Amino acid sequence: MKKIITVICVSFLLVSAAKYEAPEATYHPTIEGTWELVSHYNYNDGIHPSDTLLVADGYRQIKMYYNGKVMWTRYVPNDSVEWFGYGSYETTDSTLTEKLEYMSASMRKIANSDMKWEMELQLEKNRYSQIFRDEEGNRINSENYRRLD
């Protein structure tokens, strides 16, 4: 009987001394949310940024992604031209595709015929870059955003 009580006591001590730690959840960044443009990169060699252009004072470009939909607007001080768009988006680990279905007249003038933009995506928790490429796959420039919410 002593052996059984000893085994039970030792088992109880071992179980109570063990510390359970839940596995750490792996964070997967999401593009869903509200973003503000903070800078542009230009690429001369198609690989590395050659210069950084910060947004001008008063200039604001906001993008909102939610449930497969994207909406963006741009405000340029001292410019009466409107810039905005609305449509759908899809992402993979390395790409962002936006297909606009509604946009301002100024945007429609420069939009491609299918109103679809396929970009390289670099996404982190509170920042992302959408990188535009030429027909040969070389990087041309990027828009760099910070998360607002």
Image (cartoon, rainbow, N blue to C red):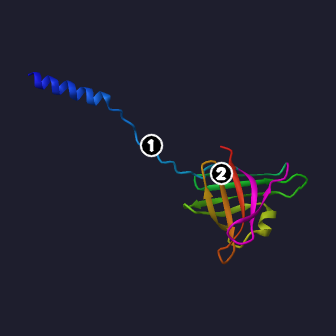
Question: Number of marks in the image?
Answer: 2
The residue sitting at 78% across, 69% down in the picture is: 110
Say if the magenta span includes residue 113: no
- Amino acid type at image mark 2: Arg
Res 138 → quadrant: bottom right
Looking at the magenta stretch, what is its main secondary structure?
strand
Q: In this view, does 28 lie to the left or right of 139?
A: left
| Residue ID at (26%, 26%) | 13
Q: Is residue 69 visible?
A: yes
Outermost residue on the bottom side: it is 136
User: Is the residue marked by circle 2 packed among few (<14), some (14-19), or many (20+) residues within 10 Å?
Assistant: some
Amino acid residing under circle 1: Glu
Is the C terminus in the top left, top right, bottom left or bottom right quadrant? top right
Near-viewer residue (81 or 120): 120
Quadrant including the N terminus:
top left
The residue tagged 2 is 127
Q: Is mark 1 on a helix, strand or loop?
A: loop
Q: What stretch is highlighted in magenta?
A: 36-57
Classify mark 2: helix, strand or loop.
strand
Reading the image, the residue beneath label 1 is 24
Percent x, y of residue 24: 45, 43
Task: Reply yes or no: does residue 55 show up in magenta.
Answer: yes
Is residue 115 in view from this perspective? Answer: no
